[in-house]
Image (spheres, grey):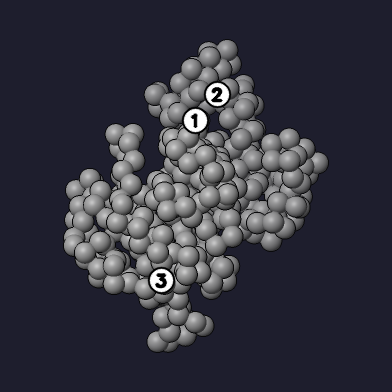
Amino acid sequence: MRTRTVLIVLFEGVDALDVVSAVEVFSAANIHAADAVPGKVAYRIRTASPGGSPVYSPSGLTLVPDTDLHTVAAPHTVVVPGPYSGDGSVAVNAEVVHWLRRHAARSRRIVSICTGAFLLAEAGLLDGKRATTHWSQADHLAQAYPDVQVDSDPIFVRDGRVSTSAGGTSGLDLVLALVEEDLGREAALALARHLVVFLRRPGTQRQFSTHLEAQLADRHSLRDVQDWIATHPEADLSVETLARRANLSARQFTRAFTAEIGTSPGRYVDRSRLETARRLLEDTHDSIEHIARASGYPTSEAMRRAFQRTLAISPAQYRQRF
């Protein structure tokens, strides 16, 4: 097992979540590697900022780097976190961009998390490439850098040696994908369980899942229905049954659910079942027929039609790919 150097770039105004998510996954991978091969280090992790100075994150954390960015040679993997964009603007650090222009081309992998894509784009590293960023900044990225093929839908995109991820915890998914590439799928799954996150989501998964895209209902009875749908996809999830669970008539339930959650009960159930099937296809060896039943589809053919309609791919093809 080879040791790979990972450089995580710090700068004033960096989003602390982007930094911590990358550090934690690579650090956990080192623990896993040492358990498998005592004394083995999978990743040599370093942090660096311009001048080697501590940097302030708007979340209130001060991050102290290991070294001065200007003294660092190109590592195996460069990770560029995003500038914090709570007010909607994205500040691009000129010193980091300068370093990227000079050194990143010699790295094996170049990775951005969230709005870190803006720094890669400014350095010319995304020209002609497909990339993503936080959904709220995707239009801004596309307008500012027309040579970049911006896709706001997936949670991460890998185009050759350059990888970009969306916002929030999608950086975890991208770094887990890198670990899987380096150490194997079993290692990635073990890390996902250790970090108590979903077993690695594929990059093509939309930034908005059913439960993130939909609103959380105001009233407790409808939130209970949302939880029930998520945890019992194989159950009878007809409007009449869900309405009884919410102690409402079917008509009242449909009206209230749609108003508070932003989508109809039927559409919400369809999306939730599709997500369940996708996770089971990715992370189990169960048969297509068993997964169809466990996800609430009456037949495997019904599940196949749902996949074709929404993802333009069959369940078997989905499993093969992911």
Could one spot residue 217 in this view of the protein? yes
Quickly name the residue at label 1: 214
Farthest residue, direction right: 301
Camera-near label (2 vs 3) is 3
Real-space Cα separation, disc 1 to disc 3, in angstroms: 42 Å
Q: Residue at x 45, y 76 (%)?
A: 4
Q: Residues within 10 Å of mark 2 (few under 14, many from 20)?
A: some
Q: Which residue is mark 2?
A: 263
The disc label shown at residue 74, or none: 3
Query: In the visual, does 128 lie left or right of 78?
Result: right
Q: Position of residue 78 (x, y in %)?
A: 42, 64
Q: Amino acid at mark 1?
A: Ala
Give left or right: position of 304 versus 73.
right
- In this rendering, the count of numbered labels is 3
Residue 246 locus on image (x, y percent)? 49, 23
Residue at 74 percent across and 48 percent down: it is: 315
Mark 2 touching mark 3, by CB under 8 A?
no
